[in-house]
Amino acid sequence: MPSQLLTQPADSARPRRCRATTRAAPHGTKGRKYPADPPRVEEIVAVMRQAGERPAGMRFRGLAVVLWRAGLRISEALALSEGDLEPERGALLVRHGKGGKRRQVGMDDWGWQQLDPWLKLRMELPVGALFCVISGPTAGRPWSAAAARTQFRRLAIRAGVRRRFAPHQLRHAHAVEMAREGVPLNVIQRQLGHADLGITSVYLQGIDSGEIVDVVHGRRAPVIPAAVALGP
């Protein structure tokens, strides 16, 4: 993946939704359930590009890339401080994950490149949360999850992404993409901070049946000893 944001336009077609995984929606739709529907790379990049180059846009892109390329929960990302990052190792420290558990996660070089503009700007702001309020008397304090979700929705509309686009779906996209790349399930589990593999498996319901058929259909023929060959 190149160091610059991809330039392909977002694909507005809505893919098949999986019925196996649902989760509660935030404000306004409380009580409704949504299937796992991870956005595609083109859609995520299209939304990130809509954020622009101003400080608020750099902050949004930084948050989006941490959710997408490190698989953090929104609460975990917004709780990060500058001291929780180790760019040289490619590591982020989650101090208080779900259930209060602490873990280290990795993020790829492209993700760090996209985060870097915000890190440089963040040095000019008061010490505090990594993703913080940019101006006013509360500058340096944590950016709120509600404000972040609102920006996700607004930029997705501007990008023409015709699906629900929320922070947690970038976490789903992270899991699905790693599975497609052949990352072992137990590594994905540790990266996401899941208590057991069953939860991780649910996240991977975003892989549709067509992809499963293609992978299995493309398997190599079995190696059969000549002595037990099936025929001429």
Image: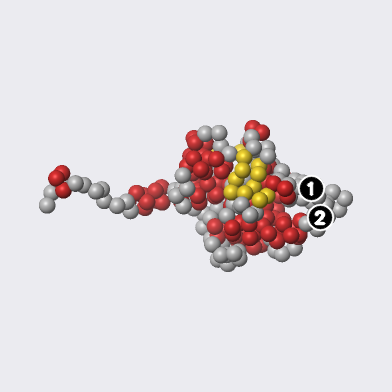
Q: In the rendered image of this protein, does residue 133 appear above or below residue 24? A: below
Q: Position of residue 156 (x, y in %)?
A: 63, 56
Residue at 51 percent across and 57 percent down: it is 13
Q: Secondary structure under badge 1?
A: loop
Indicate whether 135 appears above or below 142: below
Which residue corresponds to the image point at 47% horizontal and 48% vertical from the top-left? 183
Q: Position of residue 120 (x, y in %)?
A: 74, 60
User: The N terminus lies in which quarter of the figure?
Assistant: bottom right
Residue 125's disc is 2
Q: Quadrant of residue 50?
A: bottom right
Q: Amino acid at mark 1?
A: Gly
Which secondary structure, mark 2?
loop
Residue at image mark 1 = 128
Residue 170 left/right relative to 218: right
Residue 88 screen position, x and y as percent: 63, 54
Q: Is residue 139 visible?
A: yes
227 shown above or below 109: above
Residue 103 in which image quadrant: top right
